[in-house]
């Protein structure tokens, strides 16, 4: 069978590899000039000989949770079947360090402490509690349901799908608005609690693990290894799909691409492993059912903004209260400061990541790039004012990504009711056209969501429900990510 896969992100690459393993001929079309989708490692020009200075402009970490085991099995598969030079090596990702701290209303303190609640004059029943403990009170009962039996627990969570998380906190738990705003500020992003109750519970479940991993030398090694195994000769870059035409006689699907080297190819089946915005970007395609088109039009993707700042030294590791990995939350414009987990303690230049999404990202992405950098340096100087560090003297260069302006857009984060309305219909195949991507899974935003969806789609395309996922060929094999989600590890949803 000849299969065309649109999209060379992790979902498209995973689909391609499974189908190739089954003996099918697969061709991948990617609109961008690079492979990887939202997995994107950016490298800065090194200041010193031998240093590798990079940051993750996209996906940056892997929770060592049983729920994410498919990712680690995939890495095993790549390492077992790929070239030795493509080996994907994992290193610890530090999700939290004791010195990270929080910066709110000009005050630095412990992100898990209660002093910020006192600063903001919250009502007395809440004043002595940290945002983390309050969030735990709201979500831990739900996380325990999911931990005990994910499928049954998810059904229970879905009973509140028509509610936003904010409405749940206010109407069900009777939290005052200022308490909700405080917890959202310290634990999430501006207006994120207006998303579906289901989304916020799922996000907290994914962050309910203690141990994390990332890829040595950058996450892009992951998708590059997958692409090399697919075969670069089978992947066309700079090839956005312009027309998608099913035959009225035999149902085969013809893909027309534009770009430097246009392609026209006909396939037995096609997989669209791209987000809804990219599907809408196909100039000519079939019109599907009303609810399918509504799902494509309406599924909510949150904007994401990431800014990497290259500095002469890793000064944050040399101040009186140094941070070796982890992240700090702030009420400044860029909200989160992420400290690198690679090359800890090294005598090299380094990169800080500034990260925000939702309303904070909307406002920042409307600015000119030079203004974004200027404001970022200003806010960082405020954050590090008590350390004596001169941020401007340390600064070398910057690189940022506004994901809403990219082909792959942001990540799926549904509004109230969208799981109920769109989850099933959005993933449903249309003739010989199939769909894959993290937005079609229950694990939105995560690599495992992309893989779960791709695996389901590969089974559909092949017509073989006995098909095993990559790295799962040996039934009964022990898990690579053995830690179950633990509600007690509730932390900020970075």
Image: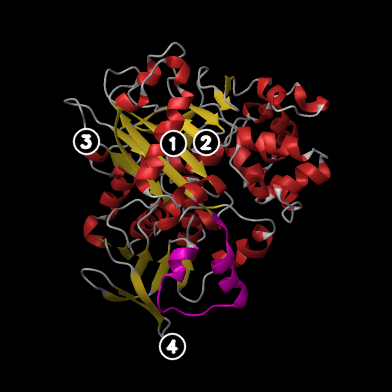
Where in the figure is residue 235, as x and y percent of width and height?
27, 60
Residue 158 shown in magenta: no
Q: Classify mark 1: residues with Cα within 10 Å, few (<14), some (14-19) or many (20+).
A: many
Where in the figure is residue 399, as x and y percent of width and height?
33, 42
Residue ID for mark 2? 335
Q: Mark 3 vs mark 1: which is more N-terminal? A: 3
Where in the figure is residue 55, as x and y percent of width and height?
35, 36
Residue at the outermost bottom position? 249
Residue 81 numbered mark, or none: none
Q: Which of marks 4 and 1 is in front?
A: 1
In this picture, residue 332 sits left or right of residue 373 = right
Residue ID for mark 1? 354
Residue 327's place in the image compared with 262, above or below, is above
Residue 29's place in the image compared with 137, above or below, is below
Count all numbered tags in the image, as a single digit: 4
Residue 259's place in the image compared with 444, above or below, is below
Assign a secondary structure to mark 2: loop
- Marks 4 and 3 in Cβ contact (< 8 Å): no
Q: Mark 1 vs mark 2: which is more N-terminal? A: 2
Q: How far, Cα to Cα, is label 4 from label 3? A: 53 Å
In the foreground, 466 or 103: 103
In the foreground, 340 or 221: 340
Q: Who's the residue at 60% across and 38% down the image?
A: 188
């Amino acid at each position: 069978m000849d299969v065309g896969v649109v999209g060379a992100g992790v979902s498209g690459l995973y689909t391609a590899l499974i189908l190739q393993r089954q003996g099918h001929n697969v061709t991948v079309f990617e609109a961008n000039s690079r492979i990887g989708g939202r997995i994107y490692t950016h490298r800065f020009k090194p200041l010193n000989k031998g240093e590798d200075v990079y940051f993750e402009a996209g996906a940056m970490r892997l929770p060592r949770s049983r729920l994410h085991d498919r990712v680690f099995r995939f890495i095993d598969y790549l390492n077992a079947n790929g070239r030795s030079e493509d080996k994907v090596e994992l290193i610890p990702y530090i999700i939290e360090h004791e010195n990270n701290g929080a910066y709110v209303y000009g005050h630095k303190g412990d992100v898990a402490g209660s002093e910020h609640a006192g600063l903001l004059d919250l009502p007395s029943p809440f004043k002595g509690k940290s945002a983390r403990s309050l969030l735990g009170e709201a979500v831990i009962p739900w996380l325990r349901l999911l931990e005990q039996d994910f499928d049954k627990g998810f059904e229970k969570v879905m009973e509140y799908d028509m509610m936003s998380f904010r409405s749940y906190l206010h109407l069900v738990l009777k939290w005052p608005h200022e308490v909700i705003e405080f917890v959202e500020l310290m634990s999430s992003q501006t207006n994120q609690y207006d998303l579906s109750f289901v989304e916020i519970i799922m996000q907290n479940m994914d962050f309910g693990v203690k141990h994390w991993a990332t890829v040595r030398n950058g996450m892009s090694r992951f998708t590059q290894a997958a692409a090399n195994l697919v075969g670069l000769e089978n992947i066309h870059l700079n090839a956005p799909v312009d027309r998608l035409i099913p035959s009225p006689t035999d149902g085969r699907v013809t893909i027309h691409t534009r770009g430097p080297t246009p392609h026209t190819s006909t396939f037995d089946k096609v997989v669209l492993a791209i987000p809804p915005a990219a599907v809408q970007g196909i100039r000519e395609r079939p019109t599907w059912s009303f609810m399918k088109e509504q799902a494509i039009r309406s599924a909510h993707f949150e904007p994401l903004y990431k800014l990497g700042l290259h500095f002469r030294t890793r000064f944050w590791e040399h101040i009186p209260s140094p941070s070796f990995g982890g992240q700090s939350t702030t009420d400044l414009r860029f909200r989160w400061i992420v400290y690198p987990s690679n090359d800890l303690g090294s005598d090299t230049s380094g990169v800080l990541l500034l990260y925000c999404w939702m309303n904070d990202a909307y406002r920042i992405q409307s600015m000119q790039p030079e203004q974004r950098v200027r404001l970022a340096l200003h806010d960082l100087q405020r954050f590090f004012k008590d350390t004596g560090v001169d941020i401007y003297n340390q600064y070398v260069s910057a690189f940022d990504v506004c994901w809403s302006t990219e082909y792959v857009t942001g990540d799926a984060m549904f509004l109230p009711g969208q799981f109920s309305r769109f989850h099933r219909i959005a993933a449903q195949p249309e003739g010989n056209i199939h769909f894959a991507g993290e937005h079609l899974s229950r694990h939105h935003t995560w690599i495992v969501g992309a893989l779960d969806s791709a695996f389901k789609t590969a089974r559909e395309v092949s017509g073989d429900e006995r098909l095993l996922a990559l790295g799962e060929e040996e039934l009964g094999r022990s898990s690579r990510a053995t830690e179950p989600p633990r509600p007690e590890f509730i932390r900020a949803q970075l």
